Amino acid sequence: MLRRSRVFWGSLSLWRPRLVFWCGALAIGVISVGFAKLADLAQKAFSGITTSGDGMFLLPLAITKAGFVISAYLAAPLFPNAQGSSLHRT
């Protein structure tokens, strides 16, 4: 019986991969919950902006276009190899 329990519990070299796996699973769970909470906060903020009146319902349209322009402007100097498909390279 003692030998079986020793095999069952194993040594540190047997448990190390298991501990890495479980720590990774816990980290993914915590990050996922945090991401979901932040998504809920963002949705509440968006709802607050769009339902406040005073023409603020147009703000998401302006923010979307401004975000695209800024992203396109920064893509060339910061990410020079992100120019598209390799099929059309000259």
Image (cartoon, rainbow, N blue to C red):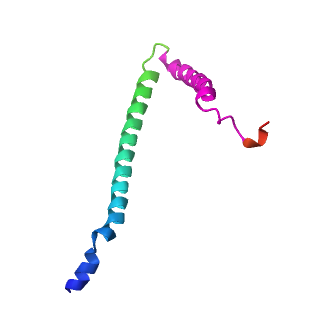
Q: Quadrant of the C terminus?
A: top right
Who's the residue at 33% across and 71% down the image?
A: 14
Q: Quadrant of residue 88?
A: top right
**Per the image, is 59 magenta?**
yes
Q: Quadrant of residue 23?
A: bottom left
Give x and y (percent) for residue 67: 55, 24
Q: Quadrant of residue 47?
A: top left
Give x and y (percent) for residue 8: 28, 78
Q: Nearer the viewer, residue 20 or 39?
A: 20
Q: Give the prevailing secondary structure in the magenta stretch.
A: helix
Q: Is residue 66 above or below residue 28?
A: above
**Per the image, is 4 magenta?**
no
Q: Nearer the viewer, residue 56 or 63?
A: 63
Q: Is residue 22 above or below residue 29?
A: below
> Horizontal placement of 50 versus 30: left or right?
right
Give x and y (percent) for residue 58: 53, 19
Residue lying furthest front: 13
> Horizontal placement of 54 versus 66: left or right?
left
> Horizontal placement of 30 versus 60: left or right?
left
Who's the residue at 37% across and 56% down the image?
A: 25
Who's the residue at 77% across and 38% down the image?
A: 89
Who's the residue at 60% across and 32% down the image?
A: 79
Residue lying furthest left: 2
* Stretch of the chain drawn in magenta: 56-85
> Horizontal placement of 55 versus 32: left or right?
right
Give x and y (percent) for residue 21: 37, 60
Q: Quadrant of the N terminus?
A: bottom left
